[in-house]
Structures are given as structure tokens and as C-alpha cells.
Image (spheres, rainbow, N blue to C red):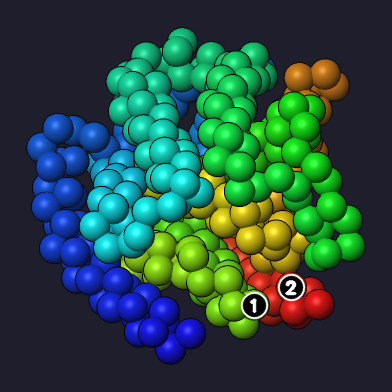
Amino acid sequence: MADTLKTSLETLFIATVASAIFAPIMISILYKFNQVSGIKKSKIGAGDGDNSLFMRIMNSTLTNGTPNMGGILIWILVPLLTLALVPMTPVVKVFLIGFALFGFWGFIDVAIFTNGFKNNEKVKAFQETFEWRMGKLTFSILLNIGVMYLLSKTGEITSINLLDLVAINITPIILVLTAIVGQFAIYSAELTDGADGLMIGIFTIINLAMLFLLTIQGQYEFIPILAIILGVQIIDLYFNIPPARFWNGGPGAMPLGFSMFFVALVTNNLIPYFLMSSITWLIMASSAIQIISMKFFKKRVFKIAPIHHHFQANGWPQYKVVMRFWLFTLFTCILGIYVGLF
């Protein structure tokens, strides 16, 4: 164990230094290619108003022009450092494929669908509709089914164990269901990326908790990888705290959401993971409730969704929302560690 921890700390230090060097270069490149936020007034998907409230919450007059693909830091460095510093096993290879794949999908989502059409009001309104969101979700689920299929082909994961109480054999149906749940984990991370420091702070806490739990359990395979992610997260959070020098967007949020779910799945820590990440699932649930209510009942449940924006609309400063969500995550992570020790 001591050797594993020593090696993991070394990878953490390397990842931190590499990120500190890479981040300023990345920021300058994003400015150069105009990969920045540009929130403008537009009709919302349901067609019963505009996005004025969202613009006010996001303080768009001050934050427009902020690079919104800073998650490239995570997407690029984590796989490269893992390839360079971590022994390759079949499961780790599948992890890297999934991490890179969802980082790329997040990159396409922001670079093309967000930045590419930020001046097109009709397209922006369509991207807020139920149909668009369901189409993106369906495509992402298909990607995740492919990743779960590759995982099953390694032969190292034949069942899903829930706290050693229930063992579910991997069948085609279970594989598809796991992919769907995994995609919701990714989507919940993406939705959490809506305030300075919110998503990256939450996932840094979750990562630390997972590192601690795996160390106590004696499961060492993914500890160096989580250490690399943590090193990158430290620098990411440094640049993402208010006022953010960049927003992560899909290239950072998607692979982080994937990685925490994947590690929990292959280490039989799904229940602790769901506890640790519960705030992200609440955020996703609030968004789903709002979308369904607007689509079928033409009524709002929240002033604006996801729920962290609802609190902001009710007068909470952004920093209060972020810090209280961090504290909630800290508590649920402690609870998740406790449950994982059984």
C-alpha cells in the first residue's frame, strides 16, 4: 500500500505541475480562436418567453467573453498522463477510451452546437427544446453502450455487486441499463457545470472521497488515475473559482462524470458513488422535472432550472449556492465512505 500511495502522490504532483503549465497556454488559445461564451437574448424552447432571467443570473454583461471550453485541460491531460505514468490493463484501456470519447463529444457539443451557433437565435431556441435534448441524450447513450460493451469484452467484469449483498450478472439487458444509468451520470455532471467552481469543486470532493475509500478497501488499480485527475482538478479549480478565468463545459464535465461512475462500477462501489454524487443527480432531476412540466403541462416547477439557478433567481449569491452545494457534497461523501466500508 505504501508503494502505491507514494507512486500516486508522485503522479498527483506531476499532473498538478503539467496542468499549471498547460492551463495558461490553453486559455490564450481559446481566446485566439474565439471559443468564448456569448449569451444573447433569445426565445426559450417552449416559446413562452425569453432568457432574460438566465442572462441576469449568469451576469452576461460581465461574463460574456469567458472561454467556455476550459475542460480541454481535463480531457487532454488526464489520458496523456495516464498513458505515460500508469500501467495499462484491459479495464484501464476501456476507461481511457470512454474518457477520451466523452471528452471529444463534449468538445463537439460546445465548439459546434454552442459556440458555432451563438449568434443564431432560432438554432439556440431549438437547442432548448425537449426534442433536441432527447436526441443528444439518445446519441450519448449509444456511445456509452459501446463503452460498456468493450468493458464486458475484457472478461474482468462479469457481474455488478451492490455492497456484496446483491450480484447482478452482466447480460445484454443489464449492459444496456448500465449504459443508460452511466449516461445519466455524465449528463448530471454536465448540468452541474452552471456556476463558477460548482462542478469542479463538487467532483474534486467526490474524487477525494473515492480515493480514500479505495485506499481503505485495498483496491489500488485506479488510485494513480484518480490522483492524476485530482492534480488536474486542483489547477482547474484555481482558474474556475469566481471570477472564473474559464468555464469547463462538456470537454471537462462529461469525462469527469464518466470517470467517477466507471470507477465506482468496476470497483463495486456504485451505492457509495450514488451517495457521494447525489447533489448532481438532484440537479439533473430538477432539470428533467422542469423540461417535462414545460413540455406536457406548460408550467414551470422552478423559476429556472437546474435547481442551483433557481436558488440564484430567489436571491442567493452565486458563491452561497456553490459553497453550500460543496458542503452538501462533503456530507454525502462522508456518508458514502461509511456505507462503502460495510
User: 21 above or below 131?
Assistant: below
Badge 2: few (under 14), some or many (20 or more) residues near its Cα, within 10 Å?
many
Q: Amino acid at mark 2?
A: Gly
Single out the mark in the foreground, 1 or 2.
1
What residue is pinned by disc 1? 217
User: 307 above or below 86?
Assistant: above
Left or right, residue 294 beside residue 24: right
Kindly check if marks 1 and 2 are in contact, taking CB atoms under 8 A apart as contact: yes
Q: Residue at x 22, y 62 (%)?
A: 19
Closer to the N terminus: mark 1 or mark 2? 1
Q: Residue at x 84, y 52 (%)?
A: 167
On the image, which quarter does residue 64 sit in? Answer: top left
Q: Secondary structure at mark 2?
A: helix
User: 68 above or below 105?
Assistant: below
Badge 1: few (under 14), some or many (20 or more) residues near its Cα, within 10 Å?
few
Instruction: Say the numbered circle drawn on residue 340.
Output: 2
Q: Quadrant of the C terminus?
A: bottom right
User: 236 above or below 83?
Assistant: below
Left or right, residue 23 beside residue 5: left
Where residue 253 sits in the image (x, y, percent)? 46, 47
Q: Amino acid at mark 1?
A: Gln
On the image, which quarter does residue 18 sit in? Answer: bottom left
Q: Secondary structure at mark 1?
A: helix
Work out whether residue 138 can be spotted.
yes
Which residue occupies the extreme top position in the image? 122
Where residue 85 sits in the image (x, y, percent)? 27, 63
Task: Estimate the spatial distance between the alpha carbons at disc 1 and disc 2, rounded to whole Å.
Answer: 8 Å
On the image, which quarter does residue 239 sit in? Answer: bottom left
